Image (tube, rainbow, N blue to C red):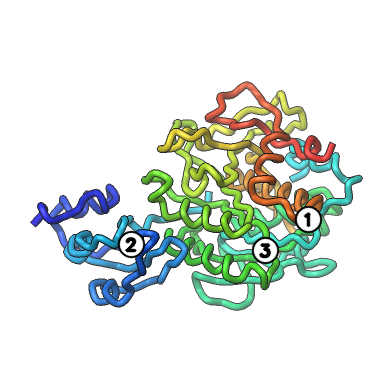
Amino acid sequence: MKSHINFNKLCPIIQGQVNSRNNNIIPVIISYKTDKKIKEGEISSLSNKFNYNLPIVNGCACDMCIQSIIEVTSDPDIEFISYDSKVFAVMDIARNVVGADLILNTGYTGKNVTVAIIDTGVSPHADLMYPTSRIVGFKDFVNNETKFYDDNGHGTHCAGILAGNGYSSKGKYKGIAPEANILSIKVLDENGNGNTSDILSTVQWIIENKEVYKTRIINFSLGAIAQYRERRDPLVKAANRAIDNNLIVIAAVGNSGPMRNTILAPATSRHVISVGALNDNRTEEINNGNIAEFSSRGPTIDRIRKPDLIAPGVNIMSLSNKNLTGYTNLSGTSMSAPMVSGAAALLLNENPNYTHFDIKRKLVNACTKIKASSYEQGAGILDISKIFS
């Protein structure tokens, strides 16, 4: 039977399942060739559960037994079948380290710029709600609730780094773009976990509704272990599609350091603005900082230098989801990414017509190198003040 299996169409995890000779039911993402139509009816008849139609990768997500997977590998229209991998979640001094306080005279605050935060949700913290609410939309892909919330805290913390206005701390713990709007997308559960197919469906929804919420930026403070090269990775394909639709995409590289080759998808995309973490050692002096031990290192499977840049990510003080006027410390590249997303929002105040690639070039050119390899720091530490000097 195995002589009829096209192993080139199967990711390594599924190949291992086939070789084990069992008939387990596993979650998969089936991608069709770009010029072919998705055969939803055929896939539905062969699957145990059809989960999503995913035009963003010209495919679909379903639960399918090994025997059925083997059968569909013979379809010449199918390009690749990947395992529906798990995705996981990965301000005072930190704000000064990236030069945010040095641009106050520009008047740029991120006002009228909407950032989609794909995460665990966002709680109605005072720093986002007063004097007026800047959470302009909420979509819950986990529990289908309509009132925004965050049962984990990760998303709320990221939102504060990006757009908290410091209302409860009298400005001490203000975010990078304190007047930006937040579109909260809850796609990770109370434990900070989700599936790749959930993320793909989320990005598709953001693209379809970008005019409704005036969304310009997507912040991924999450990722999945990169198992494939760029052209086959579903998360990379979705992120690149968002860029094609004039969205600016920023992603954390992950917390799998100090080993090399540990960048998570979608930060592995050569186009996505990928962010690693600096340990600022609680000082504003850049020369006293070093790469956070946990920050994932490059290069990627495709030998691309990543991260693109770094920002503080150790013991970052930001919004609490439990005390809606309180703050808490968290560490991770998840904390670094929204600093860069906030900087992108400031740049869009300077020129709303900037594209993703304009923003990436300006951010990378505004970095300061430290003593570390390019696979650890990319272009160096973001210095927002350089952008507007």
At which x and y percent is residue 348? 76, 53
Q: CA distance from mark 1 to mark 2?
A: 38 Å
Q: Which residue is painted at 81% across and 50% down in the image?
A: 350
In which quadrant will I find the N terminus? Answer: bottom left
Q: CA distance from mark 3 to mark 1?
A: 12 Å
Other-residue count near label 1 (Cα within 10 Å), few / some / many at <14 / 14–19 / ≥20: many
Q: Which residue is painted at 33% across and 55% down in the image?
A: 82
At which x and y percent is residue 168? 81, 58
Residue type at numbered disc 2: Ile
The one of 66 and 81 positioned closer to us in this rendering: 81
Total tally of numbered discs in the picture: 3
Of pointers 3 and 1, the one earlier in the residue sequence: 1
* In the depicted structure, whether residue 127 falls above or below residue 372: below
**Left or right relative to 138: residue 191:** left
Based on the displayed image, in which of its 4 quarters is residue 121 positioned?
A: bottom right
Residue 110 is labelled as 1
Based on the displayed image, in which of its 4 quarters is residue 76 positioned?
A: bottom left
Of pointers 1 and 2, the one earlier in the residue sequence: 2
Residue type at numbered disc 3: Thr
* In the depicted structure, whether residue 131 falls above or below residue 255: below
Give SS at disc 3: strand
- Residue for badge 2: 30
Residue type at numbered disc 1: Gly
Q: CA distance from mark 2 to mark 3?
A: 28 Å
Give SS at disc 1: loop
Residue 215 is labelled as 3
Give SS at disc 2: strand
Of pointers 2 and 3, the one earlier in the residue sequence: 2
* In the depicted structure, whether residue 342 falls above or below residue 368: below
Instruction: Tell me the mark number nearer the camera, choosing from 3 and 1.
Output: 3
- Farthest residue to the top: give it: 371
Q: Which residue is painted at 61% across and 57% down in the image?
A: 218
